[in-house]
Amino acid sequence: MSKAFWKEAVVYQIYPRSFMDGNGDGIGDLQGIISRLDYLRDLGIDVVWLGPVYRSPNADNGYDISDYRAIMAEFGTMDDWDLLLEGLHERGIRLVMDLVVNHTSDEHEWFSQSRRSKDNPYRDYYYWRPGKDGAEPNNWASAFGGSAWQYDEQTDEYYLHLFSAKQPDLNWDNPKVRQDIYAMMKWWLDKGVDGFRMDVINFISKAPELPQAPAAEGQRYAWGGQYFMNGPRIHEFLREMNEQALTPGRSIMTIGEMPGVSPEEALLYVGEERKELNMVFQFELMDIDAEGDKWNIRPWKLTEFKRIMDKWQTSLQGKGWNSLYLNNHDQPRMVSRFGNDGRYRVESAKMLATMLHTLQGTPFIYQGEEIGMTNVKFSSIEDYRDVETMNLYRDRVIEGGQDADGVMKSIYAKGRDNARTPMQWDDGGNAGFTCGKPWIGVNPNYREINVKQSLEDPLSILYYYRKLIRLRREHSVLVYGDYRMILDDHEQIYAYMRTLGALRWLVMLNFFESEAEFVLPEEIDYSGKRLVLGNYPADPGADIRRIRLRPYEARVYELE
Ligand code: GLC
Ligand code: CA
């Protein structure tokens, strides 16, 4: 397998609005991040993925960009950004920027031009269509609720927005759009950025006719994903982008966020010979606990979880590369969702982290994950800030008349604000995030769960992350080793081997709060073993032919 820095790297995701407020206005900012760079260096991460910091009216917290070459005033200035890049590079940390080019803000200059008249030179930068029989051009739904079309009086036509009405979709079929975007990407690369995380990048090629989507009876809008996910020209566009914008003469890193991609499709994006992207964020695992839409929660089984992980691991092995994540700014906190955020918070957070750092792929840590931050339950909908959550509440409760408690239950489990409460630095006011009034409430558990406490406790999740990151750096078997699942049908334990040449590592993870029996398959023989890491004190001499794993216990062994 070919070597690359982005395979060896551990990435840390910063959601700028919620990381650290440097000037007391309650909003995280660039100076705030700069003040915490030593924290990141000590953690040992190699790359920072910075959420969007471009100029934006913040309809979707920066994922609605009005100027790609300017910094959002709330976050600071371009000088601050330059200082941030310098501070990261000084510490040997690379910077990956968020690239949001499926859509712009409706306040972007291109869109202001575009909406002016049907013959404006920018008209074709977006999707404009006349209405059909007095209604929307088709029945596609916005990811944030309602129709994906917004009527605009000025020219008596509708424009397409797969996300909020303030996020009109760019028309990538127009070569001028592509050239403008590539020029912008090169501009950032010239400024020294080390790569891009590309927002919903597999949505940029739409089926040319924008066809009506099949809808269930009585359903007014249908998602329509089959007409814009992995569309007809997607690979052409990404290869062109790669050729024209992604070859700055030094190594950079590219990650495509891709809902609705199977491992087979993923290989078309990340196959090493394909010259498109380095890796994708897949969503199959994120959909494991939902039926229909994300708010409709269903229980999941570990065997299903394992089947998904195993499929991605083995399908890409030797041909492409996986990203590894269990949460981010769009997903609930991993310890609340896949672990146990009560009695076994520490153990289960460490167990999940063990998995993320010992599978094949590049681990992504989302801010706060490394101290075991949890979901939040605000009692009132007034305390929520996310456009997706607010639209859901409006559509279902205020306009739809559904039971508020049921909807709040879904929001508690799946709402994106779970991940967006401020980073918990210490047990002082507002968790040390701001000396002002935070833009979104702090999780009340900050008195127990915070960085300061973690630094004082040698057994903290934070120190365990440092160990894992170091381990992965020191042992290439964790990066380049082959992966093979064992105990496939075990309902409580996920276990696998990583092998590289003569090196053999064994990982065992108990996903439950009850004890579980691990029995080593007969065919695996060994003459010696070394306990490399675990989340409980353990007897290094224990017989691994048969072991009782404690609640959420994780162990990593090297076999001889
Ligand atoms: C991606 C982002 C999400 C955003 C959406 C629209 O899924 O991660 O935060 O709302 O795209 O840009
Ligand atoms: Ca601020």
Image (cartoon, rainbow, N blue to C red):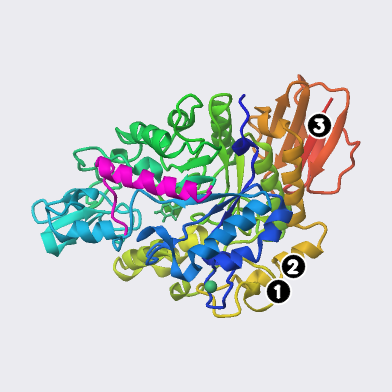
Q: Secondary structure at mark 1?
A: loop
Badge 1 vs badge 2, beta-carbon distance below 8 Å? yes
Q: Is mark 3 within 8 Å of ligand 1?
A: no
Which corner quadrant of the image does residue 481 belong to? top right
Please, what secondary structure does the residue beneath circle 2 have? helix
Magenta residues span 167-193
Q: Find disc 2 in the rendering and name its residue.
A: 452
Q: Quick check: is 169 in the magenta stretch?
A: yes
Label 1, label 3: how far apart the Cα atoms are: 39 Å
Q: Quick one: SS at disc 3?
A: strand
Tell me, yes or no, whether the highlighted magenta stretch contains residue 86: no
Q: Amino acid at mark 2?
A: Lys
* Residue found farthest to the top: 523
Question: In the displayed structure, does residue 205 sit left or right of residue 19?
Answer: left
Would you identify the image quadrant in which residue 485 lies?
top right
Rendered location of residue 499, percent (x, y): 72, 25
Amino acid on which disc 1 is placed: Asp
Identity of the residue drawn at 82% across and 39% down: 532
Percent across and percent down for residue 408 are 46, 66
Q: Please rate how many residues cluster around mark 3, counting C-alpha atoms within 10 Å: few if below 14, some from 14 to 19, many from 20.
A: some
Q: Which residue is mark 1?
A: 427
Task: Decide which of tag 1 and tag 3 comes sooner along the chain.
Answer: 1
The residue that mark 3 highlights is 558
Q: Nearer the viewer, residue 183 or 64?
A: 183
**Spatial CA span between label 1 and label 2:** 8 Å
